[in-house]
Image (cartoon, rainbow, N blue to C red):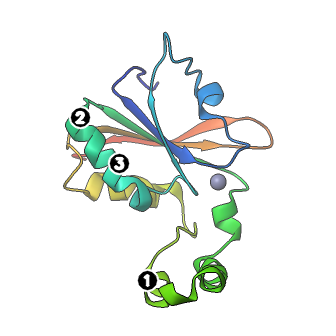
Amino acid sequence: MIATGAGVVVLSCSDPRLNPYQILGIDGKTVKATMVRNAGGRVFDAIRTLAVLQTIGQPGTIVVMHHTDCGMTHFHDDAIKEALLQIAPEEKASIEASKFGEIKGSIREDLALIRASPLIKKTTQVVGLKYDIHTGVLSQVEETKCEL
Ligand SMILES: [Zn+2]
């Protein structure tokens, strides 16, 4: 079971169908957590925020929640780059050098990135969750300490 409180950070996808407060029962009063959201709930895109939170708070647990039917499994980096080049052709070098977070593998890749980061305390509990957007079923994928 995931500990809840100010020491919990939840990283999840910004998909509007996903309501991490409701899914995890976080009411902001008796059950609290710090929310971080981005396209896909990707760790590489959130590592700066997760690292900063380690310096200004005492997050003992980082929860990464991915979901089924995620746009980042449907839209791949090449297509995103092509669309961004239409918007900002002058940023071609930057766009082509960037990762945009397509999901090819599993959530375990994101959990491994947290554990491998030198900016995340080794005592941090890392929990991976998968939410089925169609059935509402939440399942735990993995739970480890960074030091493992
Ligand atoms: Zn998503």
Give, as a three-letter code, the residue at label 3: Thr
Name the kind of residue labelled 1 in the image. Answer: Ser
> In the rendering, at what x and y percent does residue 6 appear?
36, 22
Q: Nearer the viewer, residue 2 or 94?
A: 94
Q: Residue at x 66, y 35 (%)?
A: 19
Of 60 and 15, nearer the camera is 15
Q: Which residue is mark 1?
A: 94
SS class of the residue under badge 2? helix
* Disc nearest the viewer among 3 and 1: 1
Disc 1/disc 2 C-alpha distance (Å):
31 Å
Q: Which residue is mark 3?
A: 49
Q: Which disc is residue 56 wearing?
A: 2
Q: Is residue 6 left or right of residue 142?
A: left
Quarter of the image holding residue 106? Answer: bottom right
Left or right of residue 68: residue 91: left
Q: Is mark 1 within 8 Å of ligand 1?
A: no
Q: Which residue in the rendered view is the most extreme toward the top?
A: 30
Q: Residue at point 66% right, 85% down?
A: 86
Q: Disc number at residue 41?
A: none
Residue at image position (41%, 54%) is 46
> What kind of element bears circle 3?
helix
Residue 2 percent across, percent down from the top left: 45, 26
Q: Residue at x 32, y 54 (%)?
A: 48
Q: Vertically, is 49 above or below 9?
A: below
Marks 3,1: beta carbons within 8 A: no
Marks 3/2: CA–CA distance: 11 Å
Precedes in sequence: disc 3 or disc 1: 3
Cβ at disc 2 under 8 Å from ligand 1: no
Residue 9, compared with residue 130, is above or below; it is above
